[in-house]
Amino acid sequence: MAERLWLGEGLLRRTLAELRSCGQGREECVAYWTGPLSERDHVDDLLHPIHRAARGGYEVDQQWLAEIWNALGQDRLTIRVQIHTHPGLAFHSRTDDHYPVVASVGFLSLVIPRFAREPQTLTDAHLARLEADGSWSSLDPREALLGDGS
């Protein structure tokens, strides 16, 4: 995984809108950013999984996940970032630590506070990176997520 990711045009804006719509200011929501296997530092598409949501968490539909992994593999794409909301402050919870959609070194997890309600900027977000020892380190999302991702 690259130290910095270039966001496709409008990706962040689309993602926040999807998270807001899904969670309705009441429930957590999850999405994934994907990119081509050949360009490790790019994310250019948004996946919104089938999932069950509640105020304090979410659970992705396992059949959907199996099908999407197959489709991504055929298209030479991968999930690079998991994005989800929290009701209050953004932080990486114990559940977030133990259940990422991808358990590879360098995988990123972006947590958006206040169920992604507006106003929303990356200043309030928390970005974590999975390390080789299984721990998560914090990154500044404004430095790690680049490009026109607005």
Image: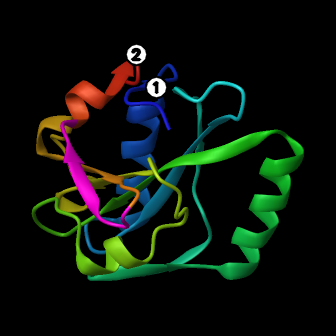
Is residue 144 visible to the viewer in this orientation of the structure? yes
12 or 103: nearer the viewer: 103
Asked if marks 2 and 1 touch (Cβ < 8 Å), the reply is yes
Q: Where's residue 62, x and y in %?
A: 68, 80
Is residue 54 visible to the viewer in this orientation of the structure? no
Location of the C terminus by quadrant is top left
Q: Quadrant of residue 123?
A: top left
Which residue sits at x=89%, y=47%?
Answer: 74
Q: CA distance from mark 2 to mark 1?
A: 6 Å
Q: Where's residue 96, x and y in %?
A: 34, 72
List the residue tagged with mark 2.
148
Extreme residue in the front direction: 133
Magenta stretch: includes residue 135: yes
Q: Which residues are magenta?
A: 133-140
Residue 47 is tagged as: none
Q: Where's residue 71, x and y in %?
A: 84, 53
Check disc 1 and report its element: helix, strand or loop: strand
81 or 85: nearer the viewer: 81
Which residue sits at x=76%, y=60%?
Answer: 69
In the depicted structure, whether residue 46 falls above or below residue 89 = above
List the residue tagged with mark 1.
7
Q: Where's residue 52, x and y in %?
A: 51, 82
Q: Residues within 10 Å of mark 2 (few under 14, many from 20)?
A: few
Q: Disc 1 marks which amino acid?
A: Leu
Which residue sits at x=36%, y=64%?
Answer: 133
Q: Quadrant of residue 141?
A: top left
Q: Is residue 82 left or right of residue 113?
A: right
Q: Earlier in the sequence, mark 2 or mark 1?
A: 1
